[in-house]
Image (tube, helix red, strand yellow):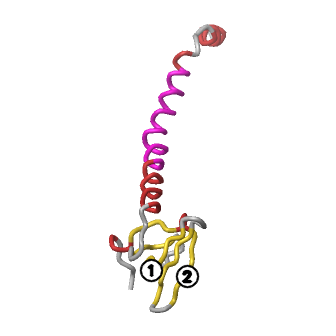
Amino acid sequence: MTNLFLQSGSGQSGLPMLIMMVAIFAIMWLFMIRPQQKKQKKIREFQNALKEGDKVVTGGGVYGTVKRVNAQENTIDIEVARGVVITVAKGYVFADATSQTPNA
């Protein structure tokens, strides 16, 4: 009886398994990869549109105001306090501070 079950399973094609694998990949792409790509594209557009006077948040959580954008070196000078200016890489500015409020 056990031989009958083993023999009946070995004659099937792998098509259902292939369809299942493709379906799993499609679902993963729709719910994980695609939203992340959209988010990264939005961040890149934000970084390329930075100008003087914009209030930003860096990747390290530093809030400040853009004082100068250096396109050649791909850096941004940010004023974090009156008279205190730091230089950060453009890729580390992730958010607009006007849409967020810092925790007090």
Label 2 is placed on what type of residue? Ile
Q: Which residue is mark 2?
A: 86
CA–CA distance between discs 2 and 1? Answer: 9 Å
> Image quadrant for the N terminus?
top right
Inspect the magenta stretch and tell me whether residue 7 lies in it.
Answer: no
Q: Secondary structure at mark 1?
A: strand
Q: Which mark is residue 76?
A: none
Residue 102 position by quadrant: bottom left
Residue 5 coordinates in the image, percent (x, y): 60, 12
Q: Which residues are magenta?
A: 17-37
Using the image as rendered, state which of residue 101 and residue 65 is in the foreground: 65
Residue 50 coordinates in the image, percent (x, y): 43, 67
> Image quadrant for the C terminus?
bottom left
Q: Which mark is residue 64?
A: 1
Q: Secondary structure at mark 2?
A: strand
Please, is residue 14 above or below residue 68 in the view?
A: above
Please, is residue 46 above or below residue 102 in the view?
A: above
Using the image as rendered, state which of residue 6 and residue 104 is in the foreground: 104
Residue 75 position by quadrant: bottom right
Q: Residue at x 47, y 83 (%)?
A: 79
Residue 28 coordinates in the image, percent (x, y): 48, 39
Q: Residue at x 39, y 81 (%)?
A: 103
Residue 58 coordinates in the image, percent (x, y): 50, 72
Please, is residue 43 above or below residue 84 in the view?
A: above
Using the image as rendered, state which of residue 78 and residue 14 is in the foreground: 78
Dot 2 alpha-carbon crowd within 10 angstroms: few under 14, some 14 to 19, many 20 or more: some
Dot 1 alpha-carbon crowd within 10 angstroms: few under 14, some 14 to 19, many 20 or more: many
In this image, 68 relative to 4: left or right? left
Using the image as rendered, state which of residue 38 and residue 89 is in the foreground: 89
Inspect the magenta stretch and tell me whether residue 18 lies in it.
Answer: yes
Q: Residue at x 52, y 85 (%)?
A: 85
Label 1 is placed on what type of residue? Gly
